[in-house]
Amino acid sequence: MNRVVITGMGVLCGEIKPCTVYDTSGLVTDKFGEIDGLDRNNRLYDIIRRTVGDMLTDAGLSAGDISAYVGDCRMFFGTLLARDNAFLEHSRTGADTLAMMNEFAVYAAGLAGVRGAVDISSASCAAGTTALGMAFDFIRNGLCSCAVAGGAEELTQIAGYGFNCLRSLSRDVCNPYDVKRDGINIGEGGAFFMLEELGHAKARDAKIYCEILGFASGNDAYHATSPEPTGEEAYHLMKNALSDAGLSAEDIDYINGHGTGTVLNDTMETNALKKLYENAEKKPFVSSSKARYGHCMGASGAVELADVIRSMHSGDPIVMPNLTEPLDCCEMYNAPESVDMEFAMSNSFGFAGNSASIIIRRWVSE
């Protein structure tokens, strides 16, 4: 099978602070991961425009260059809610919300110059990771030579009020994997990547960040919103991703967990990690990017992979600023001063059991 590398990325995310996008007076909190300076009426378009543009620049490509690949470059787009008006329109008229999501995927493809097929993942909060895994699978199996993949999400009232009804919002700033965690902060953001078959990247002398080694997706078929509590399904997902990558659990230097800060998710993840590393001599550092900019919903997996790649090359750990009393496996949640990260795993566990795990290796010139 073909080897697949990442040669460019663009990412945008906010910081957790009082929300100015919509009225939060009916919620338990006003703290959301909001991005400053977005077009107020076209937030999602703005996120996509900026991140796709940054990805092209970073990859050393133009939309014209990608257009010249014709059908040999595809778009893989992940989102959960897209934007409020899609669902509000559906509630009023029964309009097809997937078609409205397609509007943003096609917009991203147009900006990037993609002339191949446009594929959408709406696999709950695993949508972004699933989109990247789909692109990886297509390229390694020779169905295309390159792909633009990622996800985008804006702050929506539906997400805010929906999670409030589920009693899942944190009253302050989320604190993943802490004994006193009390919920999530909804965030917004986006990240897009240029994925290429290794020979394709080398032929144009592209800068290479990392190689994608493995991917797995799954569904625990347990509940519409609650994760399977023992962590058994999450454990098998990680095992499948490791098997796909040809690695053992002890090879992994860092895991970016889903880490929402809810009682149920973090307990489930900790159970899965304890099972995965039960007899391991070497254990990875584990943290959640959501502690810094919130839960970017369907875009979270893409935004978090960009965070992992940055950490992989800088050596700066992805810290959880408010962590004071870690759950069991505490040695895995305590941040080191620096990380030497060759192999990393990024996990997403979403509603209805949707899950995805992707494994990358820091690139060293060959």
Image: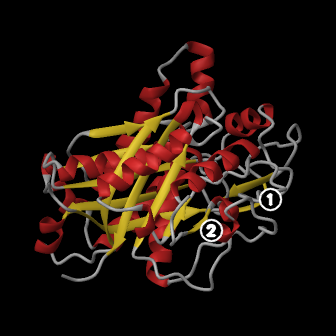
Residue at the front extreme, as displayed: 279
Quadrant for the N terminus in the image: bottom left
Instruction: Specify few, some or many for label 2: CA neighbours under 10 Å numbering under 14, 14-19, or 20 or more.
Output: many
**Percent position (x, y) of residue 114?**
25, 50
**Percent position (x, y) of residue 204?**
14, 73
User: Foreground residue, 295 or 237?
Assistant: 237
Quadrant for the C terminus in the image: bottom left
Three-letter amino acid code at the position of disc 2: Met
User: Foreground residue, 239 or 17?
Assistant: 239
* Rendered image quadrant of residue 94: top right
**Percent position (x, y) of residue 159?**
68, 38
Instruction: Specify few, some or many for label 1: CA neighbours under 10 Å numbering under 14, 14-19, or 20 or more.
Output: many
Q: Is residue 295 above or below residue 159?
A: below
Three-letter amino acid code at the position of disc 1: Val
How many numbered marks are there? 2
User: Residue tagged by mark 2?
Assistant: 332
Q: Is residue 355 above or below residue 129?
A: above
Q: Does any portion of residue 31 appear in the rendered image?
A: yes
Q: Is residue 85 left or right of residue 214?
A: right
Q: Is residue 197 above or below residue 202?
A: above
Q: What is the C-alpha distance between the residues marked 1 and 2?
A: 21 Å
Q: Nearer the viewer, mark 1 or mark 2?
A: 2
Tell me which residue sits at (62%, 18%) in the image.
Answer: 91
Question: Which coloring applies here?
Answer: secondary structure
Tell me which residue sits at (44%, 44%) in the image.
Answer: 78
Tell me which residue sits at (17%, 67%) in the image.
Answer: 198
Q: Secondary structure at mark 1?
A: loop
Q: Is residue 161 left or right of residue 333?
A: right
* Rendered image quadrant of residue 214: bottom left
Tell me which residue sits at (15%, 45%) in the image.
Answer: 143
User: Foreground residue, 279 or 366?
Assistant: 279
Tell me the tag on residue 173: 1
